Image (tube, grey):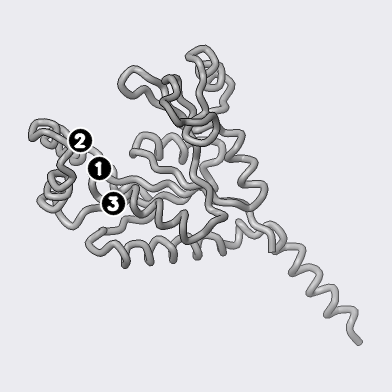
Amino acid sequence: MRRTGLLIILSSPSGAGKSTLARRLMAWDPNLRFSVSATTRAPRPGEAEGREYFFRSREQFGALVEGGQMLEHAEVFGNLYGSPRGPIEAAMAEGRDTLFDVDWQGGQQIRNSPLGQSAVSVFVLPPDLAELRRRLQARGQDAAEVIDARMDKSRGEISHWAEYDYVLVNDDLDATEAQLRSIIAAERLRRERQVDLGDFVRRMMDKDRETP
């Protein structure tokens, strides 16, 4: 039975486990594709066009936005980033799901886009803010003032939890992954996503009427 592909939006404050869960989902289902963003920043050593990013000039990026070819976009530290619509629509037509690792603003733009009806949004919460701070500190990458800034941003992210279809508390990574798998499995089976379901039912009924 054919179906349309999903747009799976995964959001969380930094340190809540979103990136780890995204990697696990990709390993679980090879047909799940990660959304490759377009950016105006220059490629770094080892990065390839279409793998890490689609590299575009500001003029090219602006034209894509003006033409409605970006599902979501934002400026981060002086560079533009966004999700090109073309590859996502192609994946949807093939029945493949696309996973987005975006913040609440990106998720909001995707849900409000022409493809928003195919979106399934999941927000991942930490067990509590003290644990979130501990995880950020355990990385050993940021100074105390940077962690404080990240925590302030996290509080802003968390304030948008009610905009999402599903909210998971990631106090156990394995359990949260299992919950995510269940959500995706159920959403794939929704009636409106089953492209051939109407024809299947009609053929079944016609066959029944033809049977003596």
The count of marks equals 3
**Alpha carbon of mark 3 to alpha carbon of mark 1: how far?**
8 Å
Q: Residue at x 56, y 25 (%)?
A: 68
Give the residue displayed 60% in from the left and 37% down from the top: 87
- Mark 3 lies on residue: 17
Where does residue 103 sit, x and y in percent of width and height? 34, 38
Rendered location of residue 83, percent (x, y)? 49, 33
- Label 3: how many Cα within 10 Å (few below 14, some 14–19, many 20+): many
- Against 155, residue 182 (above or below) is below
* Left/right of residue 204 with respect to residue 131 in the rendered view: right
Name the residue tied to disc 2. Answer: 153
Above or below residue 131? Residue 144 is above
Q: CA distance from mark 2 to mark 1?
A: 9 Å
- Three-letter residue code for mark 1: Ser
| Mark 2, secondary structure of its residue | helix
Q: Which residue is mark 1?
A: 14
**Residue flagged by tag 3: what amino acid is it?**
Gly
Q: Secondary structure at mark 3?
A: loop
Mark 2 vs mark 1, foreground winner is 1
